[in-house]
Amino acid sequence: MTWKVRVWNCQQIAMATWKYLNQPLFDSNKPMVGKISRFWYCYKISMLEKCLKINTISQRHYTQ
């Protein structure tokens, strides 16, 4: 594993931890997730949904 991948992994974990600690406590629209493992699962799903919403064409594999 290269150092860039390690730095990226650390940044992702730090961002998820920051979002976990800064959850709204008494929001009726988005309830707080108390279990860290459940929060991590929901965080990964939300990141995947965010990536799937991006409508871009890959420049590397685009051939026509």
Image (spheres, rainbow, N blue to C red):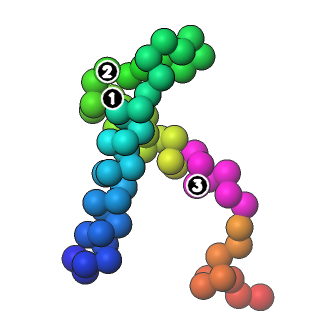
Sequence-wise, which precedes: disc 3 or disc 2?
A: 2
User: Between residues 61 and 13, which one lies in front from this camera angle?
Assistant: 13
Q: What type is the residue that disc 3 sits on?
A: Cys
> Cβ–Cβ below 8 Å for labels 1 and 2?
yes
The residue tagged 1 is 38
Residue drawn where x is 28% and y is 60% of the image: 10
Mark 1–mark 2 distance (CA, rounded to whole Å): 8 Å
Helix, strand or loop for disc 2: loop
The residue tagged 3 is 51
> Cβ–Cβ below 8 Å for labels 1 and 3?
no
Q: Is residue 28 magenta?
A: no
Q: What type is the residue that disc 1 sits on?
A: Arg
The residue tagged 2 is 34
Sequence-wise, which precedes: disc 1 or disc 3?
A: 1
Q: Residues within 10 Å of mark 3 (few under 14, many from 20)?
A: few
Residue 41 lies, in percent from the top left, at 37, 36
Residue drawn where x is 39% and y is 49% of the image: 15
User: Between residues 39 and 57, which one lies in front from this camera angle?
Assistant: 39
Mark 1–mark 3 distance (CA, rounded to whole Å): 20 Å
